[in-house]
Amino acid sequence: MSTDLWEYSKVLAEQLRLNGMKEEQVQEVVAEVQHHVLGTQQDPVGAFGQPTDYAMTWVRPKSGRWVRRIAAASAGVTGLLALAKGLRPGPWSGPVDIDWSSVILWLTWVVCMGVLPWTVEVWLARRRGRRVGTPEGVPVWGMLVAIALSTAAVIWGIATMLTDEGGVLFSAPKWVLVLMGFVCLPGLAFIGSHRNASLPADPATPVTWKTRVRRAFINR
Amino acid sequence: MGRAKVREDRQSQWLKGVLDLAVLAALSRETSAYGYTLMTSLAEFGFEGIKGGTIYPLLSRLEDDGLVKSEWVTGESGPPRKYFWLTPSGRAELDSGRDGWRTFSNTMTKALEG
């Protein structure tokens, strides 16, 4: 089976970016593949392997990057919920009770908005990068189960909060919650899809006079 | 079946150990080489079946080590090409590798043939 070169290039670029490679190097790696395949007419998967595996030979993913991203998204959710609690009517120095239902709601939101989108996105991207040129049809049951479970958890969290059965864990002044909310809120920028599977630009650089001399006299 | 796999693995390990030198040697033969002309050159000397997925990361490592230099060149048609050439350090490394290989090869031949 012949694999579409441009599809391969996009998926490879996505894998390299996911692994944290700089864009200039992504351009070079992808252009090398394109040039090689166009010159030899080989199948890209046959010549380079699946994009996920080939990307790993260049740069291995750093787990710290993913943890930081999940932590930032989780902080954003925390800020949002802290503001929602802190901006309710009442005196600024007045205490706000944090009970179990609030904690459960926070946890479900952190999981659903901070952890799941990014991890599912990475998982799907890796899956794409291991199946270029192969027929579709493998079920995505794992993702569906995760989404179903997270939705159920959100509903359960909201229901728990509304019934207000949990005991108070601690109280904090409103201004503390509002301050915490504004500090953590920028983390929301890390929520959602950050997929970048676009084709990188060409890496060619202008020819310098040194190169012209070298080509003319040394490496003709 | 088991022994055949062992033999195949052994060949693969040998190749892994000397492929960088073979690439440096191919670059010294070619005046202006890019990825697949290097592979053609290697194939002419018996290194057939080496894939692009092996050669390009290796060339990048050699470049990081300062043994090879490269430059992207835009042609009149098609995607840009990356040309490689040896640096003086690369030539020195190749010379050193040749000496090392001769010594190793002689030692191994003696060990195998008595």
Image (cartoon, coloured by chain):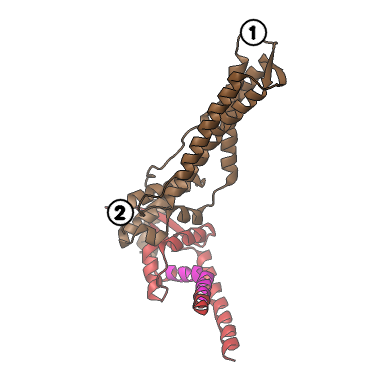
Chain colours: A brown, B red
Residue B12 in picture, x, y percent from top left: 50, 72
Residue A130 relative to residue B102: left or right? left
The quadrant of the picture occupied by the N terminus of chain A is bottom left
| Amino acid type indicated by mark 2 | Gly
Residue B65 in picture, x, y percent from top left: 54, 60
Tell me the residue at 29%/53% (across/down).
B78
Is residue A46 or residue B99 the one in the foreground?
Answer: A46
What secondary structure characterizes most of the magenta part? helix
Residue B43 relative to residue A57: left or right? left
Residue to which mark 2 is pinned: B75
Residue A166 in picture, x, y percent from top left: 67, 22
Inspect this view and state whether residue A181 appears.
yes
Tell me the residue at 45%/49% (across/down).
A127
Query: Of helix, strand and loop, which one carries label 1?
Result: loop
Q: Which mark is residue A90?
A: 1
Residue A67 in picture, x, y percent from top left: 59, 40
| Amino acid type indicated by mark 1 | Gly
Give the magenta-colored segment's residue range.
B9-27
Is residue A36 or residue A44 the one in the foreground?
Answer: A44
Is residue A58 or residue B3 the one in the foreground?
Answer: B3
Query: Residue B49 lies in what quarter of the image?
Result: bottom left
| Residue A119 drawn in magenta | no
Tell me the residue at 39%/72% (across/down).
B43
